[in-house]
């Protein structure tokens, strides 16, 4: 690089550059996509939380959101579709010193990976799971997902979705997650704070981020990128501690955002040490 | 002890510290033993929600630095194929034990077979090389499990132990040697300047030195086709370069990886090619045939994959005929036929599964097919 280029590079330095694989930018995300905002809020939260970033890993599954792991300058693992959570569980249990963040999409975490999510939440595995919910399968071109609103149009529901979507915070709560929050990409500051809280919770933390996918979801549902953000602004209701049964994504009635669960309880590895390891035995040695 | 228990003990002797399990007959006892023993030595056992998760968890655990393992049987082995491929492409050491039972599908859950041998070779999508071993006794599964971990670490690859219900459940005398007599191999770790490390650049034997999570190298590991940095590279060229090294690190080290045993082959007119529990049939058949004056010998494959091609070709040039003995309807047999390539007649002594093949059947086939 010439000095002039370096100076220019310095001038446009992003505050998160030290956490980004800058050599891999430009990223694959479309203009107007919400993933970038969710991702940068997540990185900001990781940075501000003060956790030891040398011992922090990001694990993703497959999807547009799942590309997150590819851009973060941490030990990062881009796994198979739906399997980020069991992969992350193995990592955490093998080396409890690691902070493990899962960053992935709604299809990945709740359709193909749904079984893994409910069990990791039940065990209270010490993971921070960030789900970018863009109401569809973005990467494969906009098919119906387990989060697609009733009657919404996708490439595989051309006349509208006959099914009802998951209420993800309710699911997380029912499965035993010890931290549950939901924000939208418009609420970047709140989202960052939620990530910080989620990282501080020594157990299974779940943060849902509602995000626009203008290319595949918005376009088919007559939502321009700005319309989606307007919806996020006008139709969201911030209500911390709202009961999880009130959290259906229903834009007519309004969508509740906030922190809904923050009840730390012993995480899976603490319980394993307590129940399965006899006291006189040597302490857990860290892996080779 | 049973073969399943000996397998678990072998894993512990090899330094296994993480086991992600899911119960299935006839492999459950491996998981049970690990669940008792791992917490005693500072390791971790977890029963995952299914075999997809069990396989994913051991790949994750290995990336975090722990030698890791899972065990299963046919139906679970099918579910593991997805993340077996992930372990192959990310070059993550781990060991998968398949205590085979008769299939397809739920098949005969409590009865042995060797019907997953081609699945072991080709079960996950795409091209790849894999190491698969086949123990013939409880004592051997103990040592073979250690060997499997050593090969996994040395070559940064998943290694399969393709045993079966009979070996898994049969109780035999097993001698567990002193820890200091056991040779264990650890993965070659990344060294030197962190900014110069190329996580997928070939090291010795074509195997890249590995950085575990938390080692400070900030690696990116992906199941996508990647370049030496580990970064996704969606080009025909990157695919070719990656595949050449992935295949090459096994193919070019075949002499170090392939293990077999010969029994009375020097003067043999006929050769039995077999592996795993069927080698017991093979050995008895050799002895009985010799007693009857027929010069039969046995090639026992200890690693079934990669295939001992050179050895089979060599034997085929010296004998009058060969038989493959395996408890399936012709899987490894196809490879034997391919390597013999018509030099001598090759016959299958197979079985649909559920029981062992009797030595008499083997001798009968040799007599009938080769006119002796
Ligand atoms: C086993 C398997 N099935 C299907 C696919 C194809 N696929 C890739 S991404 C994806 C959906 C991703 O959706 P989501 O997790 O919501 O991520 P988004 O792209 O919307 O961010 C699918 C079905 C795959 N990669 N693997
Ligand atoms: S397809 Fe949708 S989710 Fe994927 S990058 Fe484009 S806008 Fe984002
Ligand atoms: Mg999605």
Image (cartoon, helix red, strand yellow):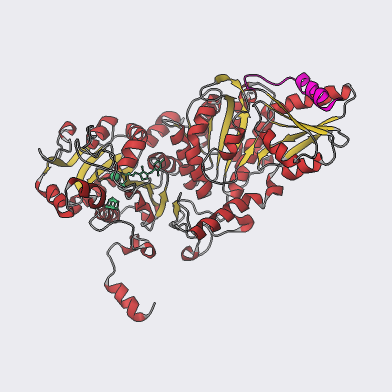
Residue ID at (15%, 51%): A229
Q: Is residue B175 visible?
A: no
Query: Residue visible at 33% across and 59% down?
Result: A27
Q: In which quarter of the image is residue A119?
A: top left
Q: Quadrant of residue A28?
A: bottom left
Q: Quadrant of ligand 1?
A: top left
- Can residue A27 be seen in this snapshot? yes
Residue A35 position (above or below residue A281)? below
Foreground of the two, B236 or B65: B236
The residue most toward the right is B293
Residue B93 location (% of width, % of height): 55, 45
Would you say residue B362 sits in the magenta stretch?
A: yes
B369 relative position to A184: left or right: right
Residue B320 rendering spot, x and y as whole percentages = 84, 34
x and y percentages locating residue A188 in the rendered image = 20, 53
Residue A148's quadrant in the figure? top left
Please name whichever residue, B44 or B291, is drawn nearer the observer in this view of the structure.
Answer: B291
Magenta residue span: B352-372
- Vertical arrangement, residue B113 with respect to residue B310, above or below: above
Q: Going by the image, does B206 lie left or right of A252? A: right
Q: Which residue is drawn at 45% across and 51% down?
A: B224
Picture coordinates of residue A237, whole percent (x, y): 11, 43
Q: B330 or B80, which lies in front? A: B330
- Location of the N terminus of chain B by quadrant is top right
Task: Say which quadrant the C terminus of chain B sits in.
Answer: top right
Vertical side of B270 occupied by A81: above or below:
below
Q: Magenta includes A279?
A: no
């Amino acid at each position: 690089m010439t000095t002039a280029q370096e100076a220019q590079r310095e001038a446009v330095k992003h505050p998160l550059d030290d956490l980004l694989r800058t050599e891999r930018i430009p990223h694959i995300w479309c203009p107007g996509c919400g993933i970038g905002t969710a991702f940068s809020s997540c990185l900001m939260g990781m940075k501000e939380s003060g956790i030891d970033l040398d011992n922090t890993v990001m694990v993703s599954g497959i999807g547009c959101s799942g590309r997150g792991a590819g851009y973060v300058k941490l030990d990062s693992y881009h796994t198979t579709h739906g399997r980020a959570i069991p992969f992350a569980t193995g990592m955490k249990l093998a080396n409890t010193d690691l902070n493990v963040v899962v960053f992935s999409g709604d299809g990945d975490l709740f359709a193909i990976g749904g079984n893994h999510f409910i069990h990791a939440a039940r065990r209270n595995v010490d993971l921070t799971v960030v789900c970018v919910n863009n109401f569809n399968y973005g990467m494969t071109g906009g098919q119906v997902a387990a989060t697609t609103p009733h009657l919404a149009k996708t490439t595989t529901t051309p006349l509208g979705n006959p099914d009802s979507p998951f209420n993800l915070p309710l699911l997380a709560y029912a499965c035993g997650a010890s931290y549950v929050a939901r924000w939208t990409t418009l609420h970047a500051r709140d989202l960052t704070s939620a990530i910080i809280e989620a990282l501080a919770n020594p157990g299974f933390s779940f943060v849902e981020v509602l995000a626009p996918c203008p290319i595949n979801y918005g376009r088919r549902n007559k939502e321009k990128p700005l319309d989606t953000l307007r919806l996020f602004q006008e139709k969201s209701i911030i209500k911390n501690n709202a009961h999880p049964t009130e959290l259906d994504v229903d834009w007519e009635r309004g969508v509740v955002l906030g922190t809904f669960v923050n009840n730390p309880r012993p995480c899976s590895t603490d319980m394993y040490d307590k129940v399965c390891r006899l006291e006189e035995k040597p302490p857990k040695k860290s892996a080779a | 002890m049973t073969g399943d228990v000996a397998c678990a003990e072998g894993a512990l002797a090899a330094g296994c510290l993480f086991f992600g399990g899911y119960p299935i007959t006839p492999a459950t006892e491996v998981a049970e033993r690990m669940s008792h023993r791992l917490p005693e030595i500072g390791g971790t056992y977890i029963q995952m929600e299914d075999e997809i998760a069990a396989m994913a968890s051991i790949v994750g655990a290995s990336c975090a630095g722990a030698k890791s393992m899972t065990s299963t049987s046919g139906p679970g082995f099918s579910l593991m194929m997805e993340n077996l491929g992930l372990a192959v492409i990310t070059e993550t050491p781990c060991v998968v034990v398949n205590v085979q039972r008769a299939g397809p599908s739920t098949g005969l859950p409590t009865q042995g077979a060797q019907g997953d041998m081609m699945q072991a070779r080709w079960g996950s999508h795409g091209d790849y090389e894999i190491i698969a071993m086949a123990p013939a006794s409880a004592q051997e599964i103990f040592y073979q499990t250690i060997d499997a971990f050593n090969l996994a670490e040395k070559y940064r690859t998943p290694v399969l132990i393709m045993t079966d219900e009979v070996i898994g459940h049969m109780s035999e005398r097993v001698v567990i040697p002193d820890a200091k007599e056991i040779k264990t191999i650890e993965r070659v770790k990344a060294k030197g300047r962190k900014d110069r490390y190329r996580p997928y650049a070939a090291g010795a034997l074509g195997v890249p030195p590995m950085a575990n999570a938390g080692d400070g190298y900030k690696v990116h590991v992906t199941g996508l086709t990647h370049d030496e940095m580990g970064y996704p590279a969606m080009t025909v060229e990157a695919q070719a370069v990656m595949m050449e090294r992935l295949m090459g690190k096994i193919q070019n080290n075949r002499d170090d990886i392939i293990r077999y045993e010969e029994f009375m082959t020097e003067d043999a007119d006929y050769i039995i090619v077999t592996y795993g529990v069927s080698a017991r049939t093979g050995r008895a058949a050799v002895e009985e045939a010799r007693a009857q004056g027929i010069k039969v010998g046995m090639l026992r494959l200890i690693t079934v994959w990669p295939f001992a091609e050179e050895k089979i070709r060599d034997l085929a040039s010296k004998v009058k005929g060969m038989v493959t003995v395996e408890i399936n309807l012709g899987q490894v047999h196809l490879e034997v036929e391919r390597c013999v390539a018509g030099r001598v007649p090759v016959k299958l002594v197979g079985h649909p599964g559920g029981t062992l093949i009797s030595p008499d059947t083997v001798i009968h086939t040799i007599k009938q097919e080769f006119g002796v």
